[in-house]
Image (cartoon, helix red, strand yellow):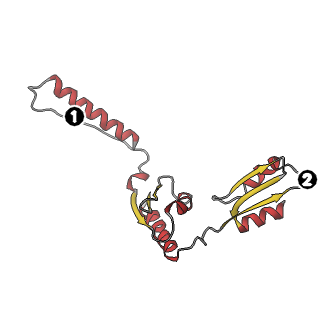
Amino acid sequence: MKIVNILLVILCFCSASLMAQDKSASTGSMQLKIDVSDDNGTDAITQIVTLKKLKASEIEPFIRARLSRYGAVHVNDATNTIIITDKPLKVKDLASLVLKLDETGSMNFLRLETEAIKLKYIAPSKIRPYIEKRLSSEGIISYNDELNMLVITDLKSRIENIKKIL
């Protein structure tokens, strides 16, 4: 897409400079051949979903994690809307999911919890890379070596699994 935009700018610049050089020319032609090697993102569409019960900014990370490489999501908290851009089927699925979640009005689909875990035999900074691999896409981990504590925010099932490993 960037190449196409650059070529169009060059085309406009060339035609403008040709017109400026010869005002008497009334005919002319120019040919532009564009080869696009990756046109998979050219059929992306955008849909705006207005939420009634959930906050748009709360649901944005959940949607962002499920987009394809061509997708994007934007949030407007003032109007409580979420703007989803992606392939047509992906947009349709995500928009219907957002509407179903908004209809129930609950955040039960994520249920993120935060738990502090005190370690006894290992420093949290040394075990952190191993724990990060077990987090969901919404999970976050922080640590404090002085207090020998891990603080994990994630789905309850993921936290329980990590606690078993520890």
Residue 70, image x and y in percent? Answer: 47, 52
Task: Give the quadrant of residue 164.
Answer: bottom right
Residue located beneath label 2 in the image: 121
Is residue 90 found left or right of 126 in the rendered image? left
Can you name the residue that lies furthest to the right here? 121
Dots 2, 1 in contact, CB < 8 A? no
The circle drawn on residue 30 is 1
User: As rendered, which of 7 and 33 lies closer to the eye?
Assistant: 7
Q: Amino acid at mark 2?
A: Tyr
Q: Secondary structure at mark 2?
A: loop
Q: Amino acid at mark 1?
A: Met
Residue 2, image x and y in percent? Answer: 40, 40
Task: Give the quadrant of residue 163.
Answer: bottom right
The quarter in which the N terminus is drawn is top left
User: As rendered, which of 57 and 156 lies closer to the eye?
Assistant: 57
Residue 5, image x and y in percent? Answer: 35, 40
- The residue lying at 84 percent from left, 51 percent from top is 148
Can you name the residue that lies furthest to the top here? 21
Q: Earlier in the sequence, mark 2 or mark 1?
A: 1
